[in-house]
């Protein structure tokens, strides 16, 4: 079945490098080479109408609740609140000491049109969640997002200021602070793994993977090829970037984590212990096609040192 793609969504998750190869080594120092694929997407936005919501907010030990089944914010009000939010964020942004000029005002670096674009962007993305993925944001989700902000912020004083400039109004906080953050996170996730959008690209990546008979052929695909050498231990050679590879020095914990992520790509029941998992990883074998938020890729262990 064909699913039309809304104009506000980019067409494809790109395979900047459709395939992905890797090398792992373990010793007093160890090496892993990897071919990686990366890409990014941006969702365009345009102004939309008001969005109704009912929301609650929790700040520290105090809980404020305010059902607003029929309340709405106009676009102008949202822009006004966005400016207040940006003022707080800009005020807390540290100006580099090496800069000889003084820190400019917010008006000097952000125009009204830019503020309007920020509001338009989150409104359109929020509408896309409802119209395209049938996942409209609920009051419960907005509440959970505000709880997350209050409980996990690393800058509680900044969050208090943000709440204050939004009038400590739970509805406004939900709509102008929680909604943009939650919408961006959810849209990224739903877009990234939607086969209606990326299905054709996935089939092309699978076809290219089937055509590769040896790891040497990975360089002949239409994607970007990169080798990464992972070096384990404190006393690793400084020439880690030799032979055109990019070296990454890892401590024992980082090394174990890297091995435990790689091993399951080649062995269905890989051992949990990193040392044993390392022994199960075959040299020169391509993994099955993998997928993350930005790309399709495959990996291969190229060798050990």
Image (cartoon, grey):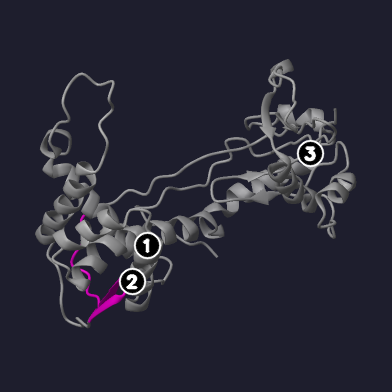
- At which x and y percent is residue 52? 22, 74
Q: Secondary structure at mark 3?
A: loop
Task: Judge whether residue 26 can be spotted in this image.
Answer: yes
Per the image, the residue denoted by label 3 is 300
Q: Kindly identify which numbered label has been placed on residue 142.
A: 2
Q: Which residues are magenta?
A: 46-65
Residue 304 in the image, given as x and y percentages of width and height: 85, 31
Question: Which quadrant is the N terminus positioned in?
Answer: bottom right
Residue 36 quadrant: top right
CA neighbours of label 3 inside 10 A, class few (<14), some (14 to 19), many (20+) = many
Earlier along the polypeptide chain: callout 1 or callout 3?
1
Residue visible at 58% across and 45% down in the picture: 295
Sooner in the amino-acid sequence: mark 3 or mark 2: 2
**What is the number of the mark on residue 182?**
1
Q: Are marks 2 and 1 in contact (CB under 8 Å)?
A: yes
Asked if residue 60 lies in the magenta stretch, the reply is: yes
From the top left corner, tell me how far across and down residue 206 is, in percent: 71, 47
């Amino acid at each position: 079945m064909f699913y039309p793609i809304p104009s506000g969504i980019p067409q494809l998750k790109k395979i900047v490098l459709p395939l992905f190869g890797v090398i792992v080594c373990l010793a007093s120092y160890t090496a892993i080479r990897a071919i990686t694929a990366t890409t990014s997407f941006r969702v365009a936005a345009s102004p939309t109408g008001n969005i109704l919501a009912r929301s609650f907010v929790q700040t520290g030990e105090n809980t404020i609740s305010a059902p607003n089944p029929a309340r709405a914010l106009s676009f102008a009000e949202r822009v006004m609140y966005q400016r207040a939010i940006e003022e707080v964020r800009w005020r807390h942004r540290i100006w580099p000491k090496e800069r000889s000029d003084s820190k400019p005002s917010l008006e000097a670096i952000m125009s009204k049109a830019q503020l309007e674009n920020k509001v338009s962007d989150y409104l359109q993305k929020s509408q896309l969640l409802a119209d395209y993925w049938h996942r409209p944001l609920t009051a419960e989700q907005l509440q959970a997002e505000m709880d997350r902000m209050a409980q996990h912020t690393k800058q509680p004083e900044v969050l208090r200021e943000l709440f204050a400039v939004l009038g400590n109004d739970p509805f406004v906080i939900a709509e102008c602070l929680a909604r943009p953050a939650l919408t961006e996170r959810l849209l990224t996730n739903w877009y990234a793994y939607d086969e209606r959008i990326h299905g054709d690209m996935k089939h092309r990546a699978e076809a290219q993977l089937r055509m590769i008979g040896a790891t040497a052929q990975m360089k002949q695909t239409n994607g970007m090829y990169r080798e990464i050498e992972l070096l384990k231990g404190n006393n690793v050679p400084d020439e880690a970037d030799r032979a055109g590879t990019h070296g990454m020095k890892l401590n024992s914990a980082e090394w174990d984590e890297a091995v435990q992520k790689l091993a399951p790509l080649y062995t269905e029941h890989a051992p949990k212990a990193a040392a044993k998992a390392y022994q199960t990883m075959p040299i020169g074998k391509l993994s099955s096609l993998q997928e993350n938020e930005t790309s399709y890729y495959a990996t291969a262990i190229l060798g050990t040192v």
